[in-house]
Structure formats: structure tokens, C-alpha cells
Image (cartoon, helix red, strand yellow):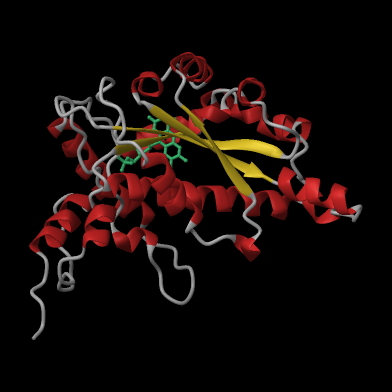
Amino acid sequence: MTQPTSDTLASLFRSRYGGEPPRSAPPPANPVLETLLAHRSVRAFDAERALPPGTLEWLIAAAQSAPSSSNLQTWSVVAVEDPERKARIAEYAGRQAQVREAPLLLVWLADVARLRTLADDAAVPIEGADFLDTSLMAVIDAALAAQNAVTAAESLGLGTVYLGAIRNRPEEVAAELGLPPGVFAVVGLCIGWPDPARPAAVKPRLPQRAVLSHERHAASDTVGHVKHYDATMQSFYASQGMPAVRWSDHSLARLRDPAQLRGRHRLVEALAAQRIGLR
Ligand SMILES: Cc1cc2nc3c(=O)[nH]c(=O)nc-3n(C[C@H](O)[C@H](O)[C@H](O)COP(=O)(O)O)c2cc1C
């Protein structure tokens, strides 16, 4: 007997694409796909409600279950719960209020120091660590681990939001967290119970035809797709009672000049100082 297709998935798909339905029948009910498609960043937490005991251990088990390039596991993570430390990090990261509100901040680190230590101990060279690809590998590993933790947290009913602004003032963050050379804070992740009084909604994405090509990269009708998406996002923002800015305007403004990078335009310098391979 074939299982019925999932109405929930069809409805989540429509939310993800501003009302556009899937072209294929949704698969049968599937809690993993439902969790993934229902993702929304949460910036309003119930600051009084603690995480259930043991949550961190399971989130990290999910994170460590992510694939890892050559299984080198070139990442680590710092769990920050101390309100004063969170407040200082919030300050370094553009004063984002959710960092204070969320009971847990996970800082995901690209970490080549572990292998450097092993090389020192074994008195063997580790020249590969000086190269950009190794650093990129560590960043990718850290990001995959972090995203597994996001999905795990959301599957438990928790809310999360990334904190890219942790890279605004990398030296201060490194000092705050005691990061040794070879370790760099890639992204933060705020985790807590969503405040039911200030719920977040599923934010539509570009249509699949704008991001997916087959066999070879195909220049899509970028301007046409984005015009359509601008309209989708304007109605999304209006439905949320937010200013109905166009996604294209917002996105271009975000990259207009180095000042928009809020300090991150000097990341190469900070990484070099932290002995992250850039060759
Ligand atoms: C690497 C990364 C860094 C981010 N940094 C921040 C941040 O510093 N502050 C914030 O409020 N949201 C941050 N976000 C969340 C994005 O703004 C959000 O994912 C995007 O607007 C799409 O919304 P959604 O996650 O609700 O679908 C970040 C997301 C990613 C992937």
C-alpha cells in the first residue's frame, strides 16, 4: 500500500516559495523534511525558559554526525551561557539583542590547532595547514556541523539564529574566547525557546529555477526571477508588519562598499594574525 502524500509538506513548500506549489507530488509525511522546510530564524527568545537538561550533549552529537572532510574534524565549538560573556559578545557582534536573550550561544570554530599540536608532538611537518584550502575545509566542516545542530534544535522545538556578526571584531572575540593560533570563530548560533508572543515566519526563497541548472551552469533570467522574488518578499514583509523593502535593494546595499561589512572587510588581516592559512 502506498502511503498518502503529505499535505504538511505541500503547504510548507508553498510557504517557502511565496505560494508557488510543488510541481511534483510531495513525498509521504516525513519529519526530517518537515523540520527542514519549516526553518525560520528566531530572534525573539523566551529569556526566562532554560533549555532542557542534556540538550547541549544531543546538539553536539548531531553536529559531530555531520560529514567531515577526510574526517579531519577541523572544527570545535564553544558553548557560552554566562550572561556577562554573552553580553560582551553581543556588543562585539553589532549589539544584537538576541545574543543576550538566548540562553545558549554556540560559537563554531574552524580549528586547525588540534592538528598543529599533534604535528608538534610528533615532530612532523604540517605545511598543508598554511594553505587556504585547509582553512576553507575547516570553515566548511564547522558550517556543516553548525547546520546539523540547527536542524537538531529545531526538531526539538527550539529556535535558532546564526550570528555572522561574530566576525565583525574577530580579535576581541578571539580574546574573549581564548582562541589559540590556528582557531577562528566562523559563526555564532543563538539557541533558545522561541517567544510565542513574537513568532517568526517561514521566509520565502528565490524560485528553484533561479538557483538550479542541469548538467552545466546556465545563466538564468536573473533580472526576471528577481523581479518576481522582490514582489514575493515585499508581500512577505508587509504580512509581517515590516517595511516592504525589495530584496534586490537590500541585497545590493549589503555589499555596496566595505563599510557595509561592519569590520569584516579586514578579515584577511585578522585571520593572518590568528595564524590561519591563507596561501
Ligand atoms: C552564516 C550566517 C550568518 C548569519 N548572521 C546573522 C546575524 O548576524 N544576525 C541575524 O539576525 N541573522 C543572521 N543570519 C540569519 C539570516 O539573516 C537568515 O538566515 C536569512 O535572513 C533567511 O531567513 P530565515 O533563516 O528565517 O529563513 C545569518 C545566517 C547565516 C547563514
Count of residue discs: 0
Name the side, left or right, on which 259 lies relative to 53: right
Task: Single out the residue that lies furthest toward the front.
Answer: 53
Is 2 or 261 nearer to us in this picture?
2
Is 110 or 212 nearer to us in this picture?
110
Q: Give coordinates of residue 190: x percent, y percent.
A: 39, 32
Residue displayed at 36% across by 41% down: 55
Residue 239 visible in image: yes
Q: Give coordinates of residue 53: x percent, y percent.
A: 34, 36
Residue displayed at 51% across by 15% down: 88
Residue displayed at 75% across by 50% down: 115
Up/down of 92 relative to 133, above or below: above
Is 52 or 18 nearer to us in this picture?
52
**Quadrant hosting residue 162:** top left
- Give the position of the N terminus as an image quadrant: bottom left
Name the side, left or right, on which 198 lies relative to 4: right
**Quadrant hosting residue 43:** top left
Q: Give coordinates of residue 238: x percent, y percent.
A: 15, 31
Up/down of 173 relative to 11, above or below: above
Quadrant hosting ligand 1: top left
Residue 257 visible in image: no
Residue displayed at 70% across by 55% down: 133
